[in-house]
Amino acid sequence: MKSWKLAGILAAVAAIGVAGCGGAGLSAADAAKAHGPITIWYSNNADEIAWGKQMVAAWNTAHPAEKVTAQEVPAGKSSEEVIGAAITAGTEPCLIFNTSPAAVPQFQKQAGLVPLDDFPGATAYIQQRSGSLATQYKSPDGKFYQLPWKSNPVQIFYNKKVFAKAGLSATSPKLATYADFLAAAQKIVSSGAAKYAILPAPSSEFYQSWFDFYPLFAAASGGQQLVENGKAQFSSETGLKVAEFWRSLYAQNLAGKETYQGDAFADGKAGMAIVGPWAIKVYQNKVDWGVVPVPTPTGMPVNAIHTFSDAKNVAMYASCKNRATAWDVLKFATSKDQDGKWLSQTGQMPLRPDLARLYPQYFVANPLYTGFADAASRTVEVPNVANSVTIWQTFRDAYSKSVIFGTAAVKSTLDGAAQKVDSLATSA
Amino acid sequence: MTTAIAGRRLRLLGQQPIGAAFVAPYAIFLAVVFAYPLVFAVYMSFHRYFFTAPGAIVDRPFVGLANYWTVLTDPAVARSFGNIAVFLVINVPLTVGLSLVLASALNAAIRFRTFLRVSYYVPYITASVAVVGVWMFLFNSGGLVNQLLGPLAPSPSWLINSSLAMPTIAIFVTWKQLGYFILLYLAALQNVPNELYEAADVDGAGRTRKFWSVTVPGVRPATTLVFILAMITGANLFTEPYLLTGGGGPDGASTSPVFLMYQKGIEQGQPDVASAIGVLLVIGVLIVSLASRRVLERGQ
């Protein structure tokens, strides 16, 4: 991308925003009471589209005067970039069923989100639906700008054939502690069962740490976020243990430093992967897999292990004119009935406590998902703080340097990053 | 009165007003796509600016050189400019040299000339996204290049080696864009009079002597163009580090200024800081282009 092109994009986005100034023509108070047709976007994943279509059809049948028009999030490098540009242009829909919690602070700064607390009973609805998990999704001003919708609690998938070839137990492998995990990884690679024990993407995108460092940090720390009370937590003794563990894997070439084109786990290049329940359908008939929780420094009871949520939420966007309808659709789409349909169609976990009790028939019929349902109650979200993406990029750069490529000491590098993050988290 | 109006119109539109009509579409295109973004980028770089929803009332104060200070004191930005210097030092001379030599060869009566011309041009018109996969296959640790090199293969491998990542990207870009620059040289070679080669033959000049004494001076204006174009496109490097080295890796060794602009402006919501990087890049490219033009056109 040429710099003038990028400058063009930046300026065009700004120009569209300027052109759209004052175009809404409806006060927020009036919009909150307005009913009528609305538009929604959802993810382009086939299962999610199928769920979205049936949800919209059910709503439209019952509410012909408040028709919902749905489409996939337009293609782009990422949904967040597309949504950010749409907010600036004032072309975003009323609801997006694919809002990344990491992007919420930025969208909020853009004045692109509607605080859901504005609707009568909304706060109670969110807290009742998601229980204590909802707290993580509250913005620093105490309001909900997103409805916690669904999670994909990540765990360790392992390839049973690779484990058997390496002389490891394929039914109950010892992977609970860092020492166990390292020993298993060494056997996998030294036996030639797979080129790598595990291959999380080693690239520098800000979100890649959600699938290597962060789940293990959440587990080791008993559920801490990367930043809490305006202070970085990753340079603590616990954070350093997690980082040193990963550094050992990279230093011994048990984890790959090169980007792999394709799915290393499905291709048998890596014996393990860190993924959520969405992967069950993907690996069905491709890999004979098993699943265990992420390791912790010295082991923990399974029912005490936290992990990263990999959640996507629903947010209401500022250009929405018929917000009363949008709120009604939001409640309809996240009702117990629709959540059950979501679960059965996608295998992803609605952000509700005690899923196994709520949907017993599903988990009896699909026992592979039971462990993920249990883990869903102990998920850790990305911190809802200002400069969220910059904070993650700062951490990723330090992690990449000291852990993946091992060109600097872990402690001093993470300490330096923590100082920058402290300043970023409080600067807004 | 009528004469005065006609005179004013003549001054405004020139002697051939129809000419202004022909030029207008491109002039408007330039104004909208080049001039406006550039001016707006400069404006953003002097303000605390971020994108907002239409109608949102936010304070965007003038901050003077604060964004430039942020950029100039950021080690990642300094490193990205250093990386791009490495890239240009390798890419530009290689591009100029190889494209001139290959254009000269393709201009001669050789077998499969059309096939070879097409072969060199195909990578240029193929999207980087499509060919990056092939290069990753060639240059990863278990790739074809390392298998051929055997014990001489570098460790860490090419794309994850801090010293080799940027040179590998420079070679990739040279290969990819060679077809376009060969085309420019081929066009220039058509303007070198045949009499000069015949005179050189009479003087007993060999093939190498004719190349240095007739071809090289004969295509000097094209060389200036190729040099400057290669430098401008090289300074705007983005796609290759984004795709080939996993986002400017390893550890920032292949990060380019434009890649940082993308990270800060689009991903992190800091278009003001991204614009400051962009303005510095534009100034840097202008200075180097003007200096190289002076050097290359000296004595003409």
Image (cartoon, coloured by chain):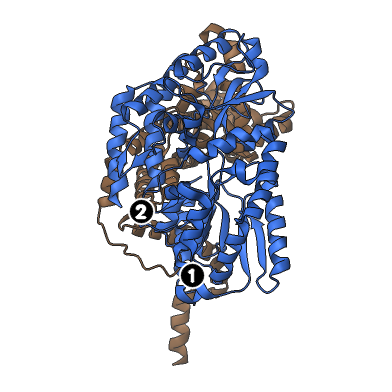
Chain colours: A blue, B brown
Q: Position of residue B161 (x, y in %)?
A: 45, 21
Looking at the picture, tell me which residue is in the foreground, B195 or A338.
Answer: A338
B113, above or below A7, in the image: above
Question: Which residue lies at the image location 62% right of the left edge and 64% below the top edge?
Answer: A39
Quadrant of residue A218 in the image? top left
Q: Position of residue A54 (x, y in %)?
A: 72, 56
Q: Which mark is residue A414?
A: none
Question: How many numbered marks does the figure carry?
Answer: 2
Secondary structure at badge 2 equals: loop
Q: Amino acid at mark 1?
A: Gly
Q: Mark 1–mark 2 contact, CB under 8 Å?
A: no
A183, above or below B114, in the image: above
> Could you give the CA–CA distance between mark 1 and mark 2, rounded to whole angstroms?
28 Å
Looking at the picture, tell me which residue is in the foreground, A125 or A385.
Answer: A125
Q: Is residue A394 visible?
A: yes
Q: Are marks 1 and 2 on the same chain?
A: yes
Task: Read off the residue under disc 2.
Answer: A140
Task: Read off the residue under disc 1.
Answer: A20
Q: Amino acid at mark 2?
A: Pro
Secondary structure at badge 1 equals: loop
Quadrant of residue A244 in the image? top left
Say which chain tag 2 marks: A
